[in-house]
Image: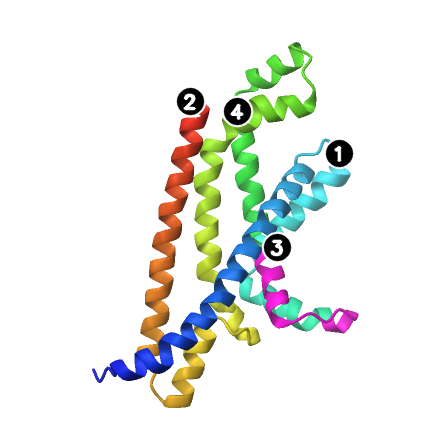
């Protein structure tokens, strides 16, 4: 394999590093939006009224059952048709957030349902407010199973960002393909991009384990 180190350090690494900022930004913003959106969807899905829970349930099922790439293209080409013009990066972040919010909603729901029903009944018997019930009893007990699952989705979003290259977002994979097209050398660019994804995924997984251990220690003490 004809690997050129000068080309790697002088061309590939600087441009990949610049694109890494776009990738990390898209990952973090999408994840934060997905956390909030997932909580909203979970509350709507578990609402007592069928008029509220049913549409939320159907929305979650439709989004989860369709490919993310299709959703990115759908938003990218549909929004301008209804008078909403967004930059490609913003559109991609929105698509990532919507898709992963449906996954986060199921994580929240599973975490809350894991709390024994007796805990809910005890809060009612003690006449605790809804705020104190969630803050002091339900949320602390539901966090241990929720945190690792949400962390996995953070890593998943990071690895889904290459799909944004299909709408011309200058993230890592898009830049690596452009480098290959310009210099007719794909090996260095694709390899460096793959190494970056590997390293960042390992770092994210390590941080998630630290957060998980911290949450468990906080609850036990």
Query: Dot 2 lies on which element?
Result: helix
Q: Nearer the viewer, mark 2 or mark 1?
A: 2
Colour basis: rainbow
Camera-side residue of 46 and 17: 17
Describe residue 194's horizontal placement relative to residue 74 as left or right.
left
Mark 3 vs 2, N-terminal side = 3
Vertical order, 89 against 107 (above or below): below
92 magenta-colored: yes
Residue at mark 2: 220
Label 1 neighbourhood size at 10 Å, few (<14), some (14-19), many (20+)?
few
Q: Residue at x 66, y 34 (%)?
A: 46
Confirm whether residue 114 shows in the render.
Answer: no
Kindly report the distance in space between the C-alpha atoms of the residues bearing marks 2 and 4. Answer: 15 Å
Mark 1 vs 4, N-terminal side = 1
Q: Residue at x 38, y 40 (%)?
A: 210
What quarter of the picture does the C terminus occupy?
top left
Mark 2 vs 4, N-terminal side = 4
* Picture disc at residue 115: 4
């Amino acid at each position: 394999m004809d690997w050129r180190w000068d080309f790697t350090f002088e061309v590939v690494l600087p441009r990949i590093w610049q694109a890494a900022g776009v990738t990390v930004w898209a990952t973090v913003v999408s994840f934060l939006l997905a956390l909030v959106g997932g909580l909203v969807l979970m509350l709507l899905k578990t609402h007592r009224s069928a008029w509220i829970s049913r549409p939320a349930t159907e929305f979650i099922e439709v989004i989860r059952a369709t490919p993310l790439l299709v959703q990115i293209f759908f938003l990218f080409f549909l929004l301008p048709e209804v008078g909403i013009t967004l930059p490609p990066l913003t559109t991609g972040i929105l698509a990532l957030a919507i898709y992963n919010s449906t996954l986060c909603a199921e994580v929240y729901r599973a975490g809350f349902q894991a709390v024994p029903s007796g805990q809910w009944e005890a809060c009612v018997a003690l006449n605790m407010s809804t705020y104190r019930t969630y803050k002091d009893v339900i949320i602390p007990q539901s966090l241990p199973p929720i945190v690792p699952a949400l962390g996995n989705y953070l890593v998943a979003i990071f690895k889904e960002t290459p799909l944004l290259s299909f709408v011309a977002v200058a993230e890592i994979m898009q830049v690596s393909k452009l480098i290959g097209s310009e210099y007719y050398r794909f090996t260095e660019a694709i390899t460096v991009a793959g190494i970056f994804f590997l390293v960042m995924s390992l770092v994210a997984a390590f941080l998630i384990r630290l957060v998980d251990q911290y949450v468990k220690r906080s609850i036990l003490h």
